[in-house]
Each structure stands twice: as structure tokens, then as C-alpha cells.
Amino acid sequence: HRLRGLLGGPSAGSAGLVGEPSLLDPRTEERTPIEALIPGTRPLEWSPDHGSLLFAAVRFDQLQISQLKLATGEIRTFTHGREDHPSGTLAPDGRLVFVTNVLVPGGKGKTESKLSITNSSGGDAKPLTPGPGDQSPCFSPDGSSLVYETRAADGQPAIALLNPVEGTPKILARGRDPVFSPDGHWIVYSQRLAAGQRLWKMRPDGSGRLALGEAPPDIGEARHLA
């Protein structure tokens, strides 16, 4: 994901965030800095009209989730507090699902992650999933379903679907960093193979799994999706 690499740095969490927030034209590879955003900002997702960008950035030493209107430079911050909120996703009706990283008592700095959901005004957040490894949420284009990364019974990364959003999660496949295609017909995600991470797609019910493209001799780490 070249755009995320240019905009957001390599990792979640407040440590290690680097990079100048920029827009990248994939046709010309021209990069235009976004002056309204601070260095280390992590882009999360565009609004359907590409007029607004949801992002995570450090505020008062913690990662918080905000949205930038490109035309005006106006920034609205959704999350607050003393915990990191490294990622989130907005539904068309304004509901926000966001990740909270929580320190494990006695865990010597170890954290667990869980999801919460707001109402359509972006307030009254309530727990959505219990954790301990729930992250990278993404709403379907119509806002009826939510896909996210969780942990399978053996502790390995897996893709889960909530359909409806506040229903019972269903594990679809092993993998990480899921996103819906713009038409909502596919979920694209990353799965680790012996040579590294590779991109796959599947239907929202878990059927039709298919690797994307041909694997080169050195696959490398294909993870973050746009």
C-alpha cells in the first residue's frame, strides 16, 4: 500500500510513527503534502466522495481518530482519553467503529485491543467486541456489515464479520487487514504464506477465496490495502 506508506508510517501505536502526510497521484507519482496534518499521521479511509479523510494522529501523547475535510482544512476529532485509538471506520450514517488499545494489568506493557461503536452523531460510544486482538475494522459500503481482524482460537490472526454490525461475529478466514471492495461484493485481506504476506479476496460469506495476482519468487510483505 504505497499511499499508506507515504502518509502514515510503518506501524500502529504512538511509537515509530514517521512520514509527512501527503496525497499521491498514482498516475504521475506526484506527492502533495497535506499541511493540515502533523507528521506521523496514519491515513485510515476516504469518505465515499473522497472529500474527507479519516486518520489517526497523536494528540496529548495518545493516538486519536479524527477526520479532515480537504476542501476547508476542518478537522473533527472523534476519540479522546488516555488510551491509544489506532484505527477506525465510518459508516455512511455517521457511526464510528474504533479500536482501543488497553494495557493488560501486570502484563509489563502488553496491550489488548477491542472495538467500540458510536451512534450516528459520533457520540455515546459503547463496547462492540471484547478483544483481546480485535483491530483494523472496515464497514461495508452500505454500513450493514463490519469486517475486522481478530484472533482465532489458536491465537493466530483471522478475519471476522459482524452481519448485522451488532450481531454475532463469524470467522471467515485466516488473515489480516481486511477491507471491503467499493461495491461490497468482496473482502480483500492479507494472509501469511511461507515466503511472506500475500493479498487474497473472498465473498462476504467466506466463499470464493482467490489469491490476487501471481506470486513472485520473493513475495515480501503485501499487507496494507486501499
Image: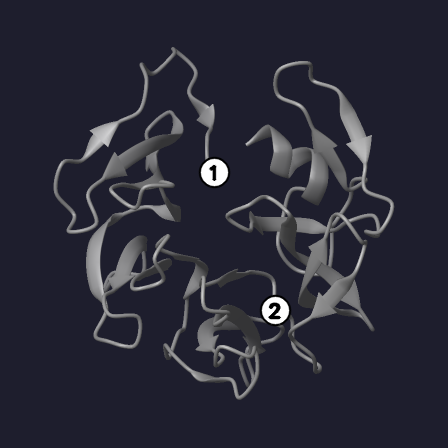
Q: Which mark is residue 202?
A: none
**Residue 191 x, y percent position in the rendering:** 33, 38
- Between the C-alphas of marks 1 and 2, the distance is 19 Å
Q: Foreground: 192 or 31?
A: 31
Residue at the outermost right position: 35
Q: Which mark is residue 85?
A: 2
Residue type marked 1: Leu
Picture residue at 38% right of the left edge, 12% below the top:
216
Label 2 secondary element: loop
Badge 2 crowding class, 10 Å Cα cut-off, few under 14, some 14 to 19, many 20 or more, is many
In the image: residue 181, left or right of residue 119: left
Residue at the outermost left position: 207
**Residue 86 x, y percent position in the rendering:** 60, 62
Specify the quadrant that holds the N terminus.
Answer: top right
Residue type marked 2: His
Q: Which residue matches tag 1?
A: 225
When asked about the image quadrant of residue 55, the answer is bottom right
Residue 199 vs 179, above or below: the answer is above
- Among numbered discs 1 and 2, the one appearing first in the sequence: 2
**Residue 145 x, y percent position in the rendering:** 29, 62
Label 1 secondary element: loop
In the image: residue 42, left or right of residue 59: left
Picture residue at 46% right of the left edge, 77% below the top:
116
